[in-house]
Amino acid sequence: MKLNLEYLKNNYLILTVKLLILCLFIFRLIQGNIETSIYWNFVAETGSGLKNYINVLKETSFYKPAIILLIPLIGIFINKKIGWILIQAYFYFLISNLIFSAEISDLTDSMQFTALLVIFLIIVFFIILMSLKKIANQVYGITKSKLIIYNIIASIFGMSMTIILALIKATEI
């Protein structure tokens, strides 16, 4: 990927989406490390070796968001159709996760409902942004006639991630 002025001028939209995903991944890793250090203070484990991190991965869910974010992170480095599907699948995962995790009490409170609606609209905005001809066709080589098929594949993949995450949470209880 060339990072010159011409490339930035033509592809600033996709670079914005990729930078957002990269920032989210880094934020989630930092958040996982902070939660791990707090966990180690209460459990009285010392050190930060690989064995201790593996134990934290087995016992807690601090790094689950970062692991899920690996899917679109891989997609940002692949400028082919599979990369586009992985990025879109993450946005569909966010929508399905938002819908399935919303409770009735969240929907009756006007402030929480407004916040959920704004988040939903932002995610839909990114889905539409990724489906623009400038990104889908010119960067990823997806023609307009095949766009709906790839969106369906990405939505199925994203919703499957939500179902898998829900099953994992159900077995932990």
Image: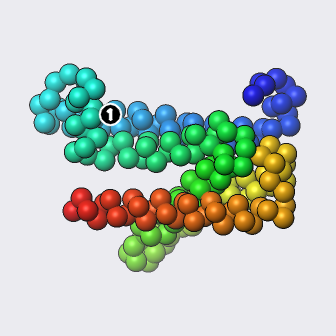
Question: What is the three-letter code of the residue carrying label 1?
Answer: Ile
Q: How many marks?
A: 1
Assess disc 1: are there few (<14), some (14-19) or many (≥20) residues with their C-alpha within 10 Å of its C-alpha.
few
The x and y percentages for residue 100 are 44, 70
Residue 105 appears left or right of 158: left
Residue to which mark 1 is pinned: 34
> Between residues 6 and 67, which one lies in front from this camera angle?
67
Residue at the image position 80 percent from the left and 43 percent from the top: 139
Against 111, residue 132 (above or below) is: above
The answer to whether residue 151 is above or below residue 53 is below
Quarter that holds the N terminus:
top right
Say which of 108 and 31 sits in front: 31
Q: Secondary structure at mark 1?
A: helix
Tell me if residue 67 can be seen: yes
Q: Position of residue 24 (x, y in %)?
A: 52, 41
Quadrant for the C terminus in the image: bottom left
Query: Residue, x 78% and y 25% (percent of image)?
Result: 2
> Which residue is at the front of the view, 113 or 14?
14
Residue 62, picture quadrant: top left
> In terms of image quadrants, where is residue 42?
top left
